[in-house]
Image (cartoon, helix red, strand yellow):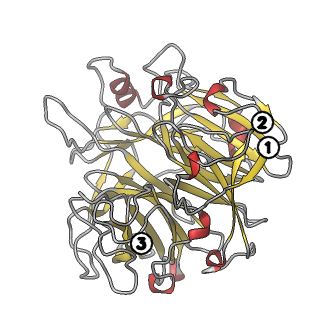
Amino acid sequence: MSESRSDAAPETGGSATRRQVLARSGAVGLGIAFTGALSELFAGTASALGRSGYGPLVPDPNGLLDLPEGFRYKVLSREGDRLRSGEGRVPSNHDGMSAFAGRHGRVHLVRNHENRPTAAVPVPAVAGITYDPAGKGGCTTLTLGSRGDVLSERVAIAGTAVNCAGGHTPWGTWLTCEETEDRAGTNGYTKDHGFIFEVDPVDPHRTGAVPLTAMGRFQHEAIAIDPGRGVVYETEDAFLKPFGLFYRFLPERPRGGLGSLRAGGRLQAMRVPGVPDLSSIQETGASFDGIEWVDVPDPLATQTPIRLQDFGPKGITHAQKLEGCYWGGSCVYFVSSFARSADGSAADHFGQIWRYDPALRRLTLVVVFGPDTDVRLPGESPDNICLAPSGGLMVCEDGNGAQHVFGVTRRGEVYAMARNRQNIGTPEAPEWGEFAGVTFAPDGRTMYVNCYTPGTTFAVTGPFRR
C-alpha cells in the first residue's frame, strides 16, 4: 500500500490538445460541456456545490494519480500483487466496483475484473465460487478497516467472463454482469456466458457462482434496482449494430433479499413508440409518454441474440453503447456512452443520459454530453457514473488520450477530479488506461476508483463537500 498527497504547484503550459487542456486546467472555466436539466439527475441528494470543483490538478511526483491540492490517495491493490488470502495474484482489468458498509466501521469493496481468455492475470479459481473453470473473469473483495487499511483481499467469484459493471442491491449484495454472449465451446469455455451473478461482499460462499438466468443472456453492462417496487433495470453494451436494448426484470420475489433473484421473473425490453434508435433524439428535455415494455421472447438467447429477436411488427428500441445505470429519487437513469452514424446509429452524439419515470411511464433525455463546436471541452463518452456526496456526479470518461474522473455539479459545471498518470504506452506515444468503478464509502468521506490497466484500486480522501 502506498500513499501520496497533492501539494505541488499546478501544471501549466504546453500544447492545446483537448485532453491536455483538461489536464492542465482542471476543466474549470472551459465552459459548460453538458446541456439539459442537470438538477434532474440529483433528486433526493444533498444540496448543490457552492462553486465548481476543487481547483486545478496537481502533478503527482510518484506518477500515479493527479488530484486537486489537499487531496491524498492510497493504492489499495495492484494487478499482479499477491492476494492477501493466498489464493493467487490480484487479477487484471479492474472495472466496476461498489462499497458496502461492514461492522465496526469496516468497508467491503467488491471489484469486477473484465477478463477475457487472453487476460494477463486471471481471477484464481476457488472451490465453491467458480462457475466455469475456463473463465478468466470474476470479482475480488477488499475489506478495509475503519482507518482505511486493507484487512483482507480475496476472490469473491471466479470462472465468469468479461465482468464489466453491475450494481448494488438494496439488501447489500453486488450484481456482477458479464459483457459477452460467448457460448460453451467458444474460446475454450465449458459453459454459456452472458449472465448476471450475485455476490455477497461479506461471505461469497453464501452466493456461490449461480447464474441468474431469468435476467437474460446478453452483453450486460450495468443494473439499477427500484427499491420500492423491486424492479431491476439492465443495460446492454452493444458497440456495433444491431445495438443494445434497455431492459427491466420483474422478479417473482420483488421484496428481494439474498438469493431472491434466483426465483425467476419476467424479462422485458423497452419500446419507445415511434423511436427505433435513441440516438435520433438530440434535444434535451425531449420526452416520450406511454413507454411500452415487451416480453423478451427467449431470455436465454438459445438460438438468436435478444436484440435480434422478433418483438412484433412495432419492433423494439435500440441504442448504441448503453452503459452506466443508477437509481435516483423515483426514477432510473441510464447512459448511452456515444453514438456514431458510421457504426450504423441514426445520428452522432458524445453521450446521453436518459431518465425513465416508472410512475408516469415517461422517458426523457435529460443530459447531452459534449460540445457541438469546441472539441477541447470535457464531457465525451461517459461510462461508469455514481452520485457524489456533494449532490453531483462523478463520471469516468472513457475515450482516447489522457484519462480523467470528472465531477459535475448540480448547476452543470464540470471539473477534473483525478487524472491517471500511469503511462502504458511509450514516451513518444503515451497511453493511459481508463478509469472505472468510481464509488464512495458509505460515510461519503472516501472516493474509491479503479484504473483499468494496469489494474490499480485507489482510495482518495480530502475535503469532499457533503
In the picture of the structure, the residue carrying the numbered disc 1 is 291
Say which label, 1 or 2, has the lower sequence index.
Answer: 2
Q: CA distance from mark 2 to mark 3?
A: 52 Å
Of residue 351 and residue 29, the one placed in the foreground of this image is 351
Q: Residues within 10 Å of mark 1 (few under 14, many from 20)?
A: some
Say which label, 2 or 3, has the lower sequence index.
Answer: 3
Query: Please, what secondary structure does the residue beneath circle 3 have?
Result: loop
Q: Is residue 365 above or below residue 459?
A: above
Q: CA distance from mark 3 to mark 1?
A: 47 Å
Query: Please, what secondary structure does the residue beneath circle 2 have?
Result: loop
Q: CA distance from mark 1 to mark 2?
A: 7 Å
| Residue type, label 1 | Ile
Residue 144, percent from left and from top: 41, 74
In the picture of the structure, the residue carrying the numbered disc 3 is 147
Of residue 151 and residue 166, the one placed in the foreground of this image is 166
Q: Which mark is residue 273?
A: 2
